[in-house]
Image (tube, helix red, strand yellow):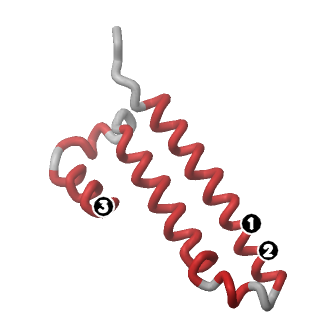
Amino acid sequence: MIILEYKKQMISDDILKFRENMMFYINTAVGIFYVGTLPFFAFNSLLWNDKEIFYNYFTLFLLTNISMYILFSIALLWGKPNTY
């Protein structure tokens, strides 16, 4: 769904106004979160064997989660329609 939304934005002229486009930031946030945390969730049982690697991936999970919610906040702040 993320790829389809990016494709829809690139085909239309919405990509030129990506700063006001709320879906651009939401798609970017979800994409970064899913790609960043895929190894953590896919290999969670294997990572328990080496605690140092597990904690590094857990820190990456927390950072991608924080960045996702920051991008959600940016989307809500910048993506508001102009009411002037």
Q: Residues within 10 Å of mark 3 (few under 14, many from 20)?
A: few
Q: Residue at x 50, y 66 (%)?
A: 34
Above or below, comparing residue 19 to residue 68 in the picture: above
Tell me the kind of residue under disc 1.
Answer: Thr
- For the residue pair 54 and 24, the one nearer the viewer reads as 54
**Residue 9 in the figure: left or right of residue 57:** left
Tell me the kind of residue under disc 2.
Answer: Tyr
Callout 1 touching callout 2 (CB < 8 Å): yes
Mark 3 and mark 2 lie on one chain; the one further toward the N terminus is 3
Q: Label for residue 59?
A: 1
**Residue 29 in the figure: left or right of residue 3:** right
Above or below, comparing residue 21 to residue 11 in the picture: above
Work out how far the residue at label 1 is from the one at label 2, CA to CA, in angstroms: 6 Å
Where's residue 31, x and y in %?
45, 61
- For the residue pair 28 and 50, the one nearer the viewer reads as 50
Q: Element at badge 1?
A: helix
Where's residue 40, x and y in %?
63, 76
